[in-house]
Amino acid sequence: MATLAKRLMTRGSAQLRRLYADIDTPPVLDVDRLFPAHHDLESRFDALRAEALAVYNGAADIPRFHDITATQARISANDGKNWRMFLVKSYGHVIQDNAARTPELARFLRANPQVTTAAISYLDPGKHIPAHRGPFRGILRYHLCLFAPDAAGPDGPWLQVDQQRIPYREGADLLWDDTYLHEVLNPGPHPRIALLLDIRRPVDRYLHRALFRWVMIGGRLSSRVLERRMRVAARR
């Protein structure tokens, strides 16, 4: 079953890339132009950081990325280090229990429906996410670094997009196209915590708008199933 899912994902990803081939943007994008709401996130930085740390300190059972999506095992379960993901919104569906634990982020999401997915990403010390690329150019990826105590030293965490290496700095943000090859390393002794958002890409073609709707419908259905599974697991 896992092999079949992987094959279907690979074929679907290739098809999506072909259908979006006429959209040509650089790997790193103008955040002020394409996501001006990031200024609101920056103004909430202290509260967002406090929420993310409270979740991290109060819940050792934050799922690993491949626990949420088995097809991500290649990049999540590759080195024995954990990449944990606290999902608050997935394909437009709000994970209510998690939103209740991150009220500041939830308020921002209610005011900004162009954000389709929101998660807090926790990388273990030493965690490496190998080079990969996203399948869907219908979204833009936004990162806001919330916690990176090793950033100033030689063991600072970094994100590399299309051979451009970008160090993580607490409070720094980035908007980028994740269909470009990218990888992440957190070489230091502390976790790296970042807010990850998917933003709906502004497009003109009807085909691209229709594809976006279909991807969101499918993702929203699977997200509802995932939320039910997480609630059952939490009650055990």
Image (spheres, rainbow, N blue to C red):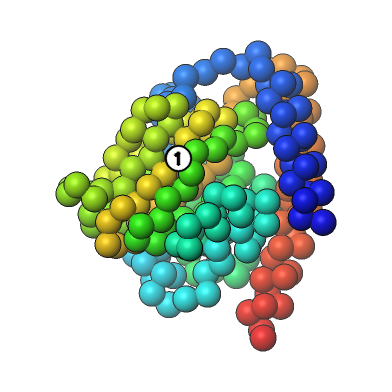
Q: Secondary structure at mark 1?
A: strand
> Residue 178 at what x, y percent from top left?
53, 34
In the rendering, at what x and y percent does residue 113 appear? 60, 43
Depth order, front residue of 42/162: 162
Q: What residue appears at the point 68 percent right and 57 percent down from the top-left corner?
A: 70
Q: Find disc 1 in the rendering and name its residue.
A: 183
Compared to residue 141, the image places residue 126 above or below, namely below
Residue type for callout 1: Glu
Q: Residue at x 38, y 40 (%)?
A: 159
* Outermost bottom residue: 236
191 with respect to 97 (left or right): left
Residue under the point 44% across and 27% down: 162
Q: Quadrant of the C terminus?
A: bottom right
User: Which residue occupies 33% across, 43% down?
Assistant: 158
Residue 99 on image: x %, y %:
55, 63
Mark 1 residue crowding within 10 angstroms, few (<14) / some (14–19) / many (20+): many
Viewer-proximal residue, 148 or 52? 148
Q: In this rendering, is residue 9 above or below 47?
A: above
Query: Could you tell me residue 230's position as x and y percent?
Result: 67, 71
Foreground of the two, 12 or 222? 12
